[in-house]
Image: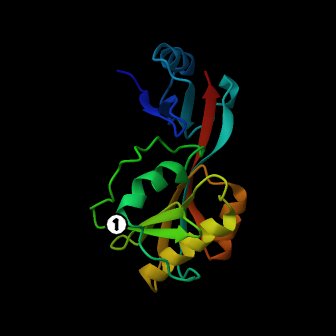
Amino acid sequence: MSQIQLGRATDGSTVAEIEVGSESLAIEEVVAEARQLGAAVLWAHGGDVAAHGFTPAEGYRRLHAQRPVRGDPLEPVEGEAYGPLLAEAYRGLWGHKHVDPARPLPTDGSVVLGLQEDEYVGLCRLWPEQRLVDQPGVIPGRRTPDRKARLLAAACVYLGEGPVDVDTWGEDAESLAEYEALGFVVADEEPGWELRL
């Protein structure tokens, strides 16, 4: 049975993904299979596969703050703006997949806050019951650490007093430093790796 999961990266190219655990994984066979399946890139989560030609990528990090700094509130994203904004907000970031711009607002109890300037430039999804926030996303050309931090601080306002967790993939060091200034620390992480095929 294949250990590969196929998907599409944010640029529309085919991406193959594998989990690298403690079990024996025949990397050469996985690379050959990914090529055979037509993948343009292979992402590996966990472990250390540098010896096989993979380059490091900013992988998964779960951030935690016991009492995060709260910023200015933001309004929820309007329904028709959600899909197109989500499709662009994570474009080019490692670990993120292609999104259909026609995707409707989620109906799972989560809330999506939007950052507007002359247009929507970013969003941040949160699950109030779990006190969990998804990585803030900002469209290319406007993607700056301070805008992402503003989204996260607004999510913390929405959640109110108490601890907050944030899941991130492919987040850059400058944005992580902004989140640290809000009181967040890395609670868990898994390395990411990439091999262009």
How packed is label 1: few (under 14 Cα within 10 Å), some, or many (20 or more)?
some
Q: Where residue 190 appears, x then y in whole percent?
A: 56, 48
Q: How many labels does the image show?
A: 1
**Residue corresponding to mark 1:** 110
Picture quarter with the C terminus: top right
Image: 138 above or below 190: below
Residue depicted at x 57% and y 17%: 28
Please name the colour scheme applied to the rendered image.
rainbow
Q: Is residue 16 left or right of residue 56?
A: left
Q: In which quarter of the image is residue 109?
A: bottom left
Residue at 34% from the left image edge and 21% from the top image edge = 1
Q: Is residue 160 above or below residue 89?
A: below
> Which element is circle 1 on?
loop
Q: What residue type is labelled 1?
A: Ser
Residue 180 quadrant? bottom right
> Residue 92: x and y, percent?
60, 43
The outermost residue toward the front is 118
Compared with 25, 69 (above or below) is below
Front residue of 91 and 85: 85
> Please, is residue 58 above or below residue 131 in the view?
above
Frontmost residue, 35 versus 123:
123
Image-based side of 162 in relation to 150, left or right = left
Residue nearest the observer in this picture, 7 or 13: 13
- The image position of residue 143, as x and y in percent, is 65, 58
Determine the residue positioned at 62% across, 36% down: 193
